[in-house]
Image (tube, coloured by chain):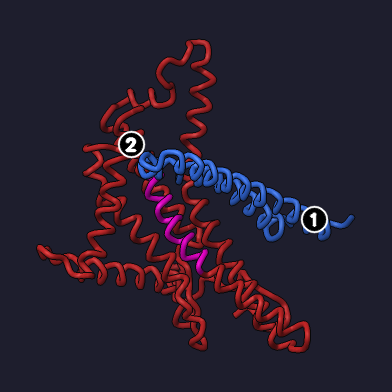
Chain colours: A blue, B red
Amino acid sequence: MDLASARVIGAGLAAIGVGMAALGVGNVFGSFLEGALRNPGAADGQQGRLFIGFAAAELLGLIAFVIAILILFVVK
Amino acid sequence: MAAEGSGIDPMHQFLVEPVLGHKLVMHGYDISFTNSALFMTITAAVLWIFMLGGMQRKLVPGRWQAAVEGMTGFVANMMDTNIGPKGKAFTPYVFSLFMFILFANLIGLVPLGIVPGWHPFTVTSHISVTAILAFVSFSIVLIVGFAKHGFHFFSLFVPHGTPVVMIPLIFVIELASFMVRPFSLGLRLFVAMTAGHILLDVFASFVVQGFNAGGVLGIPVGLLSFIMIIGISALELLVSAIQAYVFALLTSLYLNDAINLH
């Protein structure tokens, strides 16, 4: 396999990581909603923690995207 | 922009180029006024007008003043819940950070591309900008931490009640997670904006190429992409606000670590 095709395959594999982050972000918001519907009074106070969890989960997906970009454009 | 020629070039929109067309070089350094600098100036000017129009101290606020007070109240409230009364001194910094990032993100989404020869530039889609913002935040955390607590600041890396055997390991892990903070902070904003704009550009070129190709296949593809791009634009507006909020929120959390030490 030549480098060009290996690079495209690698970038495609890195995109799996972005999809995995979608699972993580969905889990964060889903769990928050589940808890918020059980106790709506406490939901507003936890919004900061919700977004911390969202940021942490999202970051890993974004790093996967960076890896894909690095493979495609930087690695020679 | 992207549909020039047959290929899609979604990276062209991130090109930093001199506004006036020619480079201005002084003593071997390129100091030309770029589109990045232009859009930072526009962001600062819009922010300045927005704030100046709203700071009126009327007892019954008008619409504009209510908008500005909503923003300041939002950030002040966030600082209060995350840091406590000691966080009040840092509210102006976090507010400036939040508003600059929010306005830069939103101005990058303004459809300037419909004017021929113009194209919008998202300042926050460059890591050189977001990394500097993150480093400024991180420097403030370090300076405040060491000024307030001296070398006691290092106790941040050893949580209370850690068994003695675990201290070396925990210290290394906490130190690594602390040192990664500025990079993750800058990288998150940069990648979120870059990815969103690449997505917008790709779908925009699908619209152009689909309608240009025409036929049974081209028109539906163009139409579907056009509907898609409306949805993605709405999503991007949401992402702009969320990323600005997350940046400000994480800065306030890191400041909380430096001020209150666990």
- Quick check: can you spot residue B183? no
Chain letter for mark 2: B
As drawn, which residue projects farthest toward the right?
Answer: A1
Q: Is residue A15 above or below residue B11?
A: above
Which residue is pictured at 46% across the width and 70% down the height?
A: B108
**Foreground residue, A26 or B90?**
A26
Residue B26 x, y percent position in the rendering: 42, 71
Residue B93 x, y percent position in the rendering: 28, 51
| Mark 2 residue element | helix
B36 vs B232, left or right, is left
| Quadrant that contains the N terminus of chain B | bottom right
Which residue is pictured at 51% across the width and 85% down the height?
A: B114
Q: Which residue is mark 2?
A: B256
Q: Are marks 2 and 1 in contact (CB under 8 Å)?
A: no
Determine which quarter of the picture holds residue B32.
Answer: bottom left
Q: Residues within 10 Å of mark 1 (few under 14, many from 20)?
A: some
Residue B248 colored in magenta in the image: yes
Q: Is residue B177 above or below residue B33?
A: above
| Mark 1 residue element | helix
Is the same chain shared between marks 2 and 1? no
The image's mark for residue B207 is none
Q: Which residues are magenta?
A: B234-251
Instruction: Give the residue type at disc 1.
Output: Ile
Which residue is pictured at 30% across the width and 67% down the height?
A: B47
B20 vs B220, left or right, is left
**Foreground residue, B252 or B231?**
B231
Number of marks: 2
- Distance, label 2 to label 1, CA atoms, is 43 Å
Q: Which residue is mark 1?
A: A9
Residue B3 colored in magenta in the image: no
